[in-house]
Image (cartoon, helix red, strand yellow):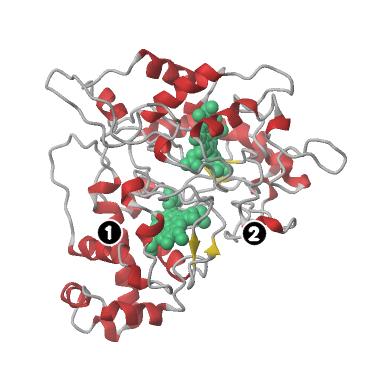
Amino acid sequence: MRFTERASAHRLALAALMGGALLAGAGAARAAAPTPTPASADARPVYSDAAALGKLIFFDPALSGSGKMSCASCHSPEHAYGPPNGLAAQLGGADLHRQGTRAVPSLRYVLNRTPIWTHAQAASRSERLSETDNAPVGGFGWDGRFNYLHEQASFPLFNPNEMANKDPAALLAKMQRAPYAARFKDVFGQNIFADPSKAFTQAMYSIERFELEDSSFHPYTSKFDYYLDEKVQLTVRELHGKKLFDDPAGGNCASCHIDQPGVNGAHPLFTDFNFQALGVPRNPELKVNADPKYFDLGLCGPLRKDQSDKLNCGLFKSVSLRNTATRHVFFHNGRFHMLKDALRFYMQRDTNPDKWYPKDAQGKVDKFNDLPVALRVNVDTTDEPLTRKAGERPVWSERDIDDVAAFLATLTDGYELKGKSGEVSGSKSSDSSGRP
Ligand code: HEC
Ligand code: HEC
């Protein structure tokens, strides 16, 4: 697909930037955000009053229609601010029975390094076919529809499937009864609640400050971080996994999930914030999918509404693979529950499509069944390893998959360094790849 060809060229150019420094635009927008330096830096980060309030708001279940759901219910700090369970989508709403439509992403690392959404549109068709047309990149959400964290925060607060507040007035009434109401007034003015729109803006701003300033969102304490700092070695297996992950003619994972330090030495996030259609199979666990006419088209909606270009349909943002080994739900629709299945899908999507997609009424494998037939051309078939034909040999063997899973497990935070000589113990965090 030409879209991804363009994307590859664009990716190379972006890679150096994304691996490390903030993009200029993102830097400007999140000016006060701490520079994304590794945890080893001695400088004590600034922690504003707003961030402290934002933390109380983030963890307050009273700020929901059910009275039981906070941001942390879905973005659990014990799970790298990702989902605490393996549900494809979480249950929320006033009665906590309403299923969402997408998997919960981890909020670790990406929040202060996600670039502003950009999609420089081509002026003409010929320009569009050349490399001068930029691929879409950045923004928050699987479809990049929010540019700022304070904008994003109001979505779950009022979404009927999530925190389900009726309106800002209902939310502010709860905030005025909160144990931190006095503190909110101390920080933003004694009369702040008299101006509802200002109070609401400050509440959303507080959440954003917490998300940007709190070091729990970017600890850089994985084995891989210590490996980059030359404090620990990777095992032969992990190094072999990394080689497979990097190989442009093989796994080619690192072309989108960047694993090289950036120009300023910042540790990589394993995403380039670009958008792709990978053709992930439809997930029957999602209730919305009971309607055969319902499709989550990512950039083309239904949640995002400003992209009319058909080439964008089915594209979702590439996510960070940090802490991926602790997850029990993968891809935007939560279709896979084991990391190794996600890896197998990449390897065998094209070589063994019958393993991943159901058969249609005529007995033919319904490949890319989570997109309407007319849009299936958007699925990436040009980037390795997504170029194979049915019956060909998958790029990785099962043993290779084990090694890549071992490598990805080095991205789990909370690795304990032991001893001054760099002797180490195993990672304390669990590993859904099933490895010890
Ligand atoms: C019911 C579960 C649920 C709750 C509660 C919830 N979220 Fe989320 N969050 C999600 C899902 C699902 C997504 C992906 C949404 C999408 O792509 O449309 C998401 C995405 C995000 C993102 C974008 C991350 C990225 O990398 O692009 C941020 C930031 C975020 N949530 C913050 C919050 C905050 C702040 C709150 C509380 C005000 C909150 N969430 C409450 C489920 C939840
Ligand atoms: C062309 C770019 C590209 C390449 C190459 C690529 N990925 Fe991805 N990856 C993505 C995008 C985009 C998503 C999100 C897609 C979605 O959910 O629909 C993703 C999602 C994932 C996820 C799910 C993470 C989560 O939290 O849900 C895993 C795991 C993953 N990729 C691993 C890999 C591995 C391993 C390779 C190499 C075999 C690889 N990727 C190659 C772009 C890419």
Q: Secondary structure at mark 1?
A: helix
Residue type of the residue flagged with mark 2: Val
Pointer 2 and pointer 1: residues touching (CB < 8 Å)? no
Label 1: few (<14), some (14–19) or many (≥20) C-alpha neighbours in 10 Å:
many
Q: Which mark is residue 288?
A: 2
Q: How many marks?
A: 2
- Label 1: which residue? 209
Q: Residue at x 64, y 59 (%)?
A: 288
- Give the position of the N terminus as an image quadrant: top right
Relative image position of residue 163 (x, y in whole percent): 44, 68
In the image, 18: left or right of 367? left
Residue 168 is situated, as x and y percent measured from the top left of the image, at 40, 78
Q: Is residue 266 above or below residue 86?
A: above
Quarter of the image for the C terminus: give it.
top left
- Is residue 27 positioned above or below 403 on the image? below
Marks 2 and 1: which is nearer the front? 2
Q: Residue furthest top?
A: 236
For the residue labelled by badge 2, is the local secondary structure a helix, a strand or a loop?
helix
Question: In this rendering, is residue 26 above or below 72?
Answer: above
